[in-house]
Amino acid sequence: MSMATRTDTQSPAPHVADSHDLIRVHGARENNLKDVSIEIPKRRLTVFTGVSGSGKSSLVFDTIAAESQRMINETYSAFVQGFMPTQARPEVDVLDGLTTAIIVDQQRMGADPRSTVGTATDANAMLRILFSRLGKPHIGPPSAYAFNVPSVRASGAITVERGAKKAVKATFNRTGGMCTRCEGRGTVSDIDLTQLYDDSKSLAEGAFTIPGWKSDSFWTVRVYAESGLLDPDKPIREFTEKEMQDFLHREPTKVKVEGVNLTYEGLIPKIQKSFLSKDKEAMQPHIRAFVERAVTFTTCPECDGTRLSEGARSSKIKRISIADACAMQISDLAEWVRGLKELSVAPLLAALQHTLDSFVEIGLGYLSLERPAGTLSGGEAQRVKMIRHLGSSLTDVTYVFDEPTIGLHPHDIQRMNDLLLRLRDKGNTVLVVEHKPETIAIADHVVDLGPGAGTGGGTVCFEGTLEGLRASGTVTGRHLDDRAAVKETVRKPTGTLEIRGATANNLQNVDVDIPLGVLTVVTGVAGSGKSSLVHGSIPAGEGVVSVDQGAIRGSRRSNPATYTGLLDPIRKAFAKANGVKPALFSANSEGACPTCNGAGVIYTDLAMMAGVSSPCEECEGKRFQASVLEYHLAGRDISEVLAMSVTEAEEFFGAGEAHTPAAHKILERLADVGLGYLTLGQPLTTLSGGERQRLKLATHMAEKGGVYVLDEPTTGLHLADVEHLLGLLDRLVDSGKSVIVIEHHQAVMAHADWIVDLGPGAGHDGGRIVFEGTPADLVAARSTLTGEHLAAYVGT
């Protein structure tokens, strides 16, 4: 027997490369983490649980995923790094065994009006190539079907520098698919002139009704009145045709007002530049209200909202244009593409087919490619981002998900679980931050953080299997099998909100009476028309307070105290107690530390390398000048008050020397929505999605609305906190409010007084009312998907 044969008969020793099967984290201190050390198995599905604010995102996203991405970025040249977002190294001692991290988070997609589901994925690009090859009549290359590409024509002489210089006549043409009227937006804006000025008055009498346009302002009103182009003493309605043209539409023109050179511009272009080009959400409330009154957006009459030029709409494959294809429900479009048999584009058809089938598989078959990307919910945006990874050939990477079941009906959660397991089975490490028991149940490994939130969290309470978590006695373990019972007695309505003939999006002429004075839950599978019914049909006017999942805008200088208006009464209380100006107690105003300008940190930009932020040495991160910190209220300075949690501050401002009723009211509302653990000065940029929505709810609770509309308030809530939320909803209803909740969580359904269930499916298979009644009737009937899942949940 040869030596080689003898060696083959022995069991081979494990290769040293196969020993790296763990991601090791030691001494993680990011945000509220307290020296966390854990070992995560690779090529397994690990679920991170814990109450909101316990440190899950800090560990998974801000430590593991952030360091993986930072290290990958460092492999590029310094020149390339200069164009990439810079990331500081996380606060951690050792991170070992990392693999490439792919983050699939809930960040909303850009709200650019030209960004659609089709452009955000590769589907539109493939469709454009398909139509440029097979479309009849042929109108040009793929760019001719792109609504983001304008047509360009140019001709003239060009000089060719080759031997003897010679002028050559040249023409240039590029055919684009952009509609010239709406410039690819699908809508055109009309300005209501009656909201800009009172035409019965002259300019000298103060005809303008635009916020901020004062009669003595050089740059706005006086440039019109004293330009010499208009008669300032003539009522606007008596202007001649030429004066009206100059007043509303004149191109920028240099004029002299009192010896000062100024630019005169027609009123409409001036309003478009100063108001319409800015983000409406970032405007002050009174300016936003003016813009909403003055500007109306209507479907473009030229392209009928398709965004495309006439040429692009005229080219068809089997009587379908690219505009028709983008307007189809994706599940229908997939069937249409499956019916195209053309060998010359077979690889393209296969790739397009796979992308469209991925939409259907992931539960987004009800969307259309023309749907604006900014209108997708956080859960829908996350699933759209997943599509490019479903057919990926990559293995041995780390996929990081942030509550992938958000916005999913219990019926759809199983499908999402299958996708997560499929990614794992290809040899990938899957890390999921999740609260839903259905997803925790499929985990190979569970890491439970806590025990509380904020400063009360940041430690690992349990690490192991699902059975071990159940027996562990942690907050998550105790609540894992919680089941709410269906209400035995329900409240009687005090009236009804009538919705008649609702046709927004996929609604099919829906008539429904929503009872008032009770807790109403609107439910149904994802894409069944819940948001269309509630947000599109309930008039958002007086008495309706809508709390949606839109992002909170704010920099790292913004915090719960500034966002809720809590800082105003606190500053006034400090000013009154010390006999000084309130502005001293603002880190964004006179009281700011001069070294860090009130940021509390010094940010050092290292150009192409990751920037470094370090606590300001002057104020030691307190953000205020030393002289300001000498002023006290009940023995505390302003920086100590901002370092308090909501619960501490509620007690501090509730009685005694610091008693401030206005501040105490706001703090009570923050505690009511389950944010008692947040510190008043914590930057808004560090809050999770669920925390931000509850912060919005706390601010809106002060409004004098009679009807509250909430969009999935259980988003980001731990099982233990859902009970707290139900108590809050009950208190709102008992105080005389009507509460309408869009929700998938069975505990909220079981607790409702009235349920409106939409369906039976998604997209054009939905949009109908399939059940109206009490939760008990829904469970008894089991006539819908929701009824079946609710019955299984309550164990009947």
Image (cartoon, rainbow, N blue to C red):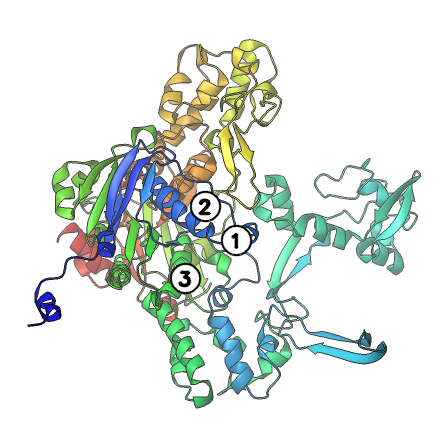
For disc 2, the marked residue is 546
Residue identified by numbered label 1: 77
Residue 738 visible to an observer of this rendering:
yes
Q: Which mark is residue 384?
A: 3
Q: Secondary structure at mark 2?
A: strand
User: Which of the two residues, 606 or 84, is positioned nearer the viewer here?
Assistant: 606
Callout 1 secondary element: loop
- Amino acid tagged 2: Ser
Q: Mark 1 to mark 3: distance in Å?
A: 31 Å
Q: Is residue 35 above or below residue 781?
A: above
Q: Is residue 203 visible?
A: no
Across and down, in percent, residue 430 comes to: 29, 54
* Image quadrant containing the N terminus: bottom left
Q: Secondary structure at mark 3?
A: helix
Mark 3 residue type: Val
* 246 to 228, vertically: above or below: below
Q: Position of residue 419 (x, y in %)?
A: 28, 62
Please give left or right for residue 48 compared with residue 563 in the image. left
Camera-side mark, 3 or 2? 3
